[in-house]
Image (cartoon, rainbow, N blue to C red):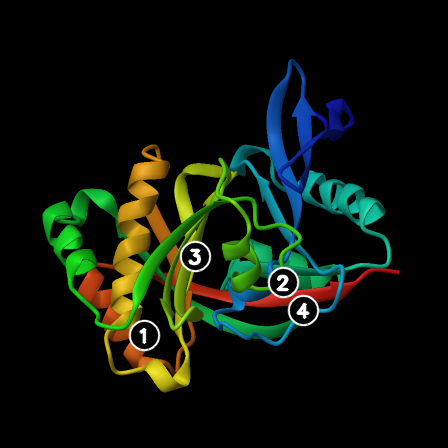
Amino acid sequence: MSEGRIDIVAEPDHLGVARWHAVASPGLVAGVAGLRPVVPFECGSPLPAAEPAGTLELSLHVEPQWRRRGIASRLLAAAGAHAAGRRLVAEVAAGSAGESFCVRHGFRRTGSWGHDLLTYCDVHHAWLGELVDVEHPGYRLRHWTGDPCGATSVEQLLRRPSRPGDAVLSAAEADGGLVAYALARSDGARPRRARQYGPAVRAGHRGRRLGLWVNAGLLKRIREIHPHVEEIETRIAHDDPAQLALRRHLGFRPLGRSIRYEITLP
């Protein structure tokens, strides 16, 4: 099929995510691009360094049989026209065609992550429940569900009422203040998978297994709220052995490595 028979079609925004489909005759989706606001606390700290206002995360995928036809460039152009003057960030697998694509289109490399994956079929759910039920005197476990768009902190989310949404949050509080959290969002492009951020624990409360507590609570809560989710993907800095040990204890396994690229659009 020729590239001329492919239309780039904007889809209705859903939960703050803008999407475009590359549609080939007769209605086959050959590729998808999406933009969503970067939620600051997804960086993994209760008090993160804020991303510049207006930063968007770009996701882009073209089916293998439709590649090398300029479809990805056309999807990027559509997303870029929508986000003129904004900063885009993208995470791509190291050494992949996506990395080459970013370099060709002027993105600059700004970091790298290791990725882990947990599948629920490998988790003993009674054991997970036992981890959640362990008492932590002086601390309280809270959960929240909803849409995090527009929030600038976990505390702000916890002040909102829970409602149906793509994000699930588990947090530990002490004396009414946030001390630890883990958050996950379902992946619109892969509905069976959710992306986890954290756990993060404030410095004065580390060494008390609060990271394990909130992470176990999150895994249990996701299964209750989003039973269609079968996998949890998470990322980790290469210099964080404590976080890595926690993930292995819960059953996460190495998945690969990603590179972060950024571009500020004209």
Q: Amino acid at mark 1?
A: Gln
Label 2 environment density (alpha carbons within 10 Å; few <14, some 14–19, many ≥20): some
- Which image quadrant: the C terminus? bottom right
Secondary structure of residue under mark 4: loop
The answer for how far apart the CA atoms under marks 3 and 4 are is: 18 Å
Return the mark for residue 51.
Answer: 4
Q: Which quadrant would residue 204 be assigned to in this image?
A: bottom left
Location of residue 202 in the rendering, given as x and y in whole percent from the top left corner: 41, 79
Q: Are marks 3 and 1 in contact (CB under 8 Å)?
A: no
Q: Amino acid at mark 2?
A: Thr
Q: Nearer the viewer, residue 75 or 145?
A: 145
Q: Residue at x 54, y 36 (%)?
A: 63
Secondary structure of residue under mark 1: helix
Q: Which residue is mark 2?
A: 152
Q: Are marks 3 and 4 in contact (CB under 8 Å)?
A: no
Q: Which residue is mark 3?
A: 183
